[in-house]
Every structure is written in structure tokens, then in C-alpha cells.
Image (cartoon, helix red, strand yellow):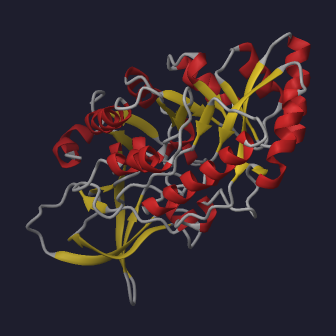
Amino acid sequence: MGIEMNVERFAGIRTPFYYYDTNILRQTLDAINKETKKHDNYFVHYAVKANANLKVLKVINEAGLGIDCVSGGEIEQVLKAGFPANKIVFAGVGKSDWEIELGLDKDIFCFNVESIPELEVINEIAERKGKMATICFRINPNVGAHTHAHITTGLAENKFGIAMEDMEKVIRLAQGMKNVQFKGLHFHIGSQILEMDDFIALAHRVNELQDRLEAQGIRIDIINVGGGLGVDYNDPQGNPIPNFKDYFAVYEQHLKVRPGQTVHFELGRAVVAQCGALITKVNYVKQGSVKQFAIVDAGFTDLIRPALYDAHHKIINLTANATQNVEQYDVVGPICESSDTFDKDIQLPTTHRGDLLALLSAGAYGEIMASSYNCRRLPDGYTNEDL
């Protein structure tokens, strides 16, 4: 990331804060566009739930990506960032009426519908407004993903999507409605997936379902395979760009795309994770009876992933000289919860009060998930272009 080169620029900035390297972000976007431009029917929608920082969004918009939203607030934010409404896909298992109305009023590209009751409400609201809602059905493919249990979304036990056995029924129901236009199928099996076999399994399941529909005379225009591609949290500086080549090759090789169909992707973490870091200051170094603690001013209110998912973020000391002795620390925050721990028993150069630490790979599900628990202030976000 080259973040060490910017440490002098951080002087005077209130910690903790998020730092975004737009050079890494643009390199990531270039890598995505390089692969997708091989296919004129591939379209990527950035999953804004990963990071909705306005400056980050504007860079993504410049690269030409569309948007995947899961709330009305996200729709409002991406419109503010300049994304055209006709590139917005609106997903989510519990869309409120006002959010559906917003999507219809803005003429977004598509609603990803997850239940019959939702379909009925969208049709009802669209009829009242004199609108036609374009929809895809999110189908739960019952495909597992090798990832944390909290971020799997494609198993039958998960709350997301419509069961495969109900697929034809809901499609026929939609085809009989006057104010919805059924266009395709949507899938998403989870997040932080590094094994390409998971995506291969999804492609094969999509092929099976398409064959089943075509046998009944149902043709679809859109296949949306979601996202889920993971990043390297262990060596983010050595491997900052995710494996987009193999990811898109999976669908090129295994997904049977029909003539005229478009294939849509919803990448989030893979787009923004590696461009971001949480910068925090060491308040105290405490020697316990069996542990040495580096107590920082960031807490799980600023980056909840370690507490929520047991997630690992590489931590580096930006202030210490690389030639200093190395010692072992638990890096912990100030929140009155034992789970407010960023990492345990890690090796850092000898660390002192006032040192700046960087928690890397924090561009996804970091700033966007921050809270004000303990009445703490929300962290600010800066880019290298701001400093």
C-alpha cells in the first residue's frame, strides 16, 4: 500500500481514522475492467454495503461500474456520488415501502426480489405509481461456501432468496402481474470466498436451473451471480489485487450463457478492502502478568470485524524504526468489552505511547460498520489525495 510513506502526512489528524489509497483502488478497478472487457455482456455492480465513503464511490463511478444497493439510504448515497440510476440493482430481503418507492421514482435498473410477499408489494406500489418494475428473482441455490458461517448466504437454512422448488411458481406469478417485468435470476452464496470450486458449483447450479426453465418455455435475459470473491488478509501489501482473472474465468468456462443474455456481478470486498487502512494511536503499553498489551484509541466501534467474525487484519507500526527489537503484543481497544481485541500475540517493533498503528485491509466493512457505542465519535475517512 505504501502507507508507511504517508505517516508524516498523518500528523495532526485526529485518530482513529480511515485512510484510503486511491492508487490501489484504481489499480483494482483497472484489473476488473481488464477482465470484464473481454466480454461485452459482463457487467459489474459494486456492492456499496462494503464501503459507502463518498470519495471512494466517486473513484468507482469514474471506472464505469454499476451499483448493488441493499437499502434506500444506499440508493441516495450513490446517486449523490453521481452513479446513474439505470445502473443500480436493489437487493435485500426486507425492502421497506419507501425504499421501493424510491427505486421506482428513480427508475433504477432492477429489483432483486426475494419472496412472494415482496413481489406482491412491488407490483402494488408500481401500479399505484403508474410504473413498471424490472425484477430478477433471487434464488437460494443451496450451494455452500468455504467461508465464515456469518457470511454464507446460499444455503437452504439462510434467510436469503427463494427456494429452488418454488422458482417456477414465482416466475409464473410475476408473468401474470401488470406492473412487474420479470427479467432474470439472481444468486449470491457468500463473502470472502477464495476457493474457485465454490463459484464453479454455483455456475453448474445455474446451468441446471436454466435448463429446467427452458424445458418449460421460460427464457431469461439476466443472470446475476452475485459476488463473494475474497482478498488476502495475511499479505495485503504483497498481494493487493484479488484474483480477478481466475474469478471471471470460472464463469467464462463453466456458465452456459444463452444468446442475448447479460451476466452481472456484485463485487464489494474485492473492490475496496485492500485500499483502506484504519489508523490508530497507541494510548498505553501495559505489561500484564502474562501478556503485554498495546492499548490503542480505536475500538470495535471503529472496526468490528475482528469481534464479529474473528477476522484477521495485519497490523503494522508506522512510527517504529524497522531495525528496532521485536516484541509480542495483544493489540486491544478502549471499549468496555473483552471482545474489543484486534489481534493477539503478534510481533511488532518495540511499541510506545503515541505510535501510530495501521490495521490493513480495512477498506471493506470497516468505516461503513462503525458505531457510536460508548458514545464514541465516528471515525473520519481520508484519501491520499486529501493529505
Foreground residue among 339 and 125: 125
Count of numbered tags: 0
| Picture quadrant of residue 97 | top right
Q: Is residue 23 left or right of residue 159?
A: left
Residue at x 76%, y 44% (from the top left corner): 93
Q: Residue furthest top?
A: 130
- Quadrant the C terminus occupies: top left
Image coordinates of residue 168 in percent, x first then y, are 82, 43
Whether 36 is drawn above or below 157: the answer is above
Q: Residue furthest left?
A: 323
| Picture quadrant of residue 178 | top right
Q: Is residue 200 left or right of residue 186?
A: left
Residue at x 27%, y 36% (from the top left corner): 27
Q: Is residue 220 left or right of residue 42?
A: right
Foreground residue among 26 and 87: 87
Whether 248 is drawn above or below 184: the answer is below
Image coordinates of residue 200 in percent, x first then y, are 49, 57
Q: Examine the rendering and report whether any part of residue 190 can be seen.
A: no
Image coordinates of residue 323 in percent, x first then y, are 8, 67
Image coordinates of residue 145 in percent, x first then y, are 56, 63
Q: Residue furthest bottom?
A: 289
Whether 366 is drawn above or below 82: the answer is below
Residue at x 49%, y 44% (from the top left corner): 367
Q: Examine the rendering and report whether any part of residue 317 can be seen.
A: yes
Q: Is residue 178 left or right of residue 330?
A: right
